[in-house]
Image (spheres, rainbow, N blue to C red):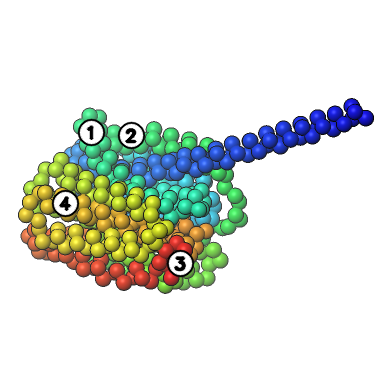
Amino acid sequence: MRVELECEKGSKSQGRLKTQKVKTSYIKVLEATSTFRYLIFTTVSISLILSSISATSIAVAFPMITAFFDVSIVVAGWIISVYQLGLTVTMPIIGKVSDALGRKFTFMSCLILFVLGSLLCAVAPNVELLVLFRLIQALGGGGFMPSAVGIVAEEFPESRQKAIGLFSSIFPIGQIIGPNLGGWLVDSFGWRSVFWVNVPIGLTALIFSALLLHPDKKKGVSIDVLGALLVGGSLASLMLGLTLMGYKTMFGFAWMMLSVAVAFAVLLLRHEMRAKDPILDIEVLKTKPFVAANVYNFVYGTAVIGVLSLIPTYATSVYGMSALECGLLLTPRSVGMIVSSVMTSIFIVRWGYRWPMIVGSLATVVGLFLLGFKPNNAALLYAIMLVLGIGVGTASPAANNACIELMPQRAATITGVRGMFRQTGGAVSVTIATLVLHEIGDMALGFSAIFIGLAIAFMATMPLIFMMPKSPNERG
């Protein structure tokens, strides 16, 4: 009897030990999962930095590429334009694909495309193939943001706003690294090195993605192929038309492309209304808060992306700055964006969406107005760039998050559509600015008109902020 009792006690103690081991293992799994979440965030952030560096470092290599292939600046300009085109077309499509087919598959596919495009660009034998390979690179790079947002939204459900907001500080890091790294690489190893550098970093991110990202769950959702083709055709025609508007000899063809874009858009809307699982969610396009967010982000793109493209030309033509001085001029803006976007991301739950967007928009408007009145010394110009950076960095995390809480399960789709409107706004801004500068003739006067016009347009969109959700916890 005593032996039986002792055996029973022994079995109970062994059971307790097993339970404790299970609990210990469970705790370790939780700790590992918490660590993995930040490793995942770092991995997807690397891809965003790569995309940002690729978009900015090419500007430094551009003169050498033009001379190497001995082509006109109009032809060589497509090396930059086609990247913008690829980003704009890809974003809304990849957002939906990520929601439908899974984050890991979509993100890794985009990484593979980006690395392949970079490798092909590095060995391109002529400018025509370089343009084609840049398009492949852009199709991968354009998918990073929407698929990354979908991953982070699922990994950080309790702090989604902070995590998505912190992405706003990732791109400015690339904008600082890109021109400086690109300049060193071009001087040391030639223009092909700005593409080669993407390959080992991209492959490293790909390996970590394969190891860290959770396997996709089969959703049994079909992809709206016809809708994707109509989206791509409409946006490609629009971007091509806008790009060609700057060339008088191509003016008729530009208007034809814009007409084709409108026709594709009409067909797209008719198709999406009937499609079982549309590539573009109509709710994300027609619901009042989303309409407000999309229009705001379109004008945001005209002011922010447009200004980023125009500042070096502005500094060179109006102030006679060198290429190095132009690069330095962009640094205060990027630093301001990083600091303010990190701060806004940390406190976004407490502050809500509206106040950061209002304060950031006002700072951006003030900065644009001051640029329009042509500052008379370099110190003031640097201060204005810092103000612009703080304004953009403050508004961006809130603008990225606004409305996502209405449909958190479609975070990637919403981000893709939002990116599409921003990129399109940037293309419209650059095209109109080019035409204005050409017609006015006087660069200083032309830039004054551009910056003041952008400031007025941005200020006019501020009432739209009150049509969007006030905070993550309130829907109106």
In what quadrant of the picture does the N terminus appear? top right
Residue 288 screen position, x and y as percent: 42, 72
Which residue carries the number 2 mark? Answer: 196
For mark 2, does the 10 Å Cα neighbourhood hold few (<14), some (14 to 19), or many (20 or more) residues?
some
Which residue carries the number 1 mark? Answer: 184
Residue 393 screen position, x and y as percent: 30, 54
How far apart are the two marked residues, 3 and 1, measured between alpha carbons?
48 Å
Task: First in sequence, mark 2 or 4: give its number.
Answer: 2
Which residue carries the number 4 mark? Answer: 383
Of circles 4 and 1, the one toward us is 4
Q: Label 2 is placed on what type of residue?
A: Trp
Task: First in sequence, mark 3 or 2: give its number.
Answer: 2
Task: First in sequence, mark 4 or 3: give its number.
Answer: 4
Of circles 1 and 2, the one toward us is 1
Of circles 3 and 1, the one toward us is 3
329 horizontally vs 230: left or right: left
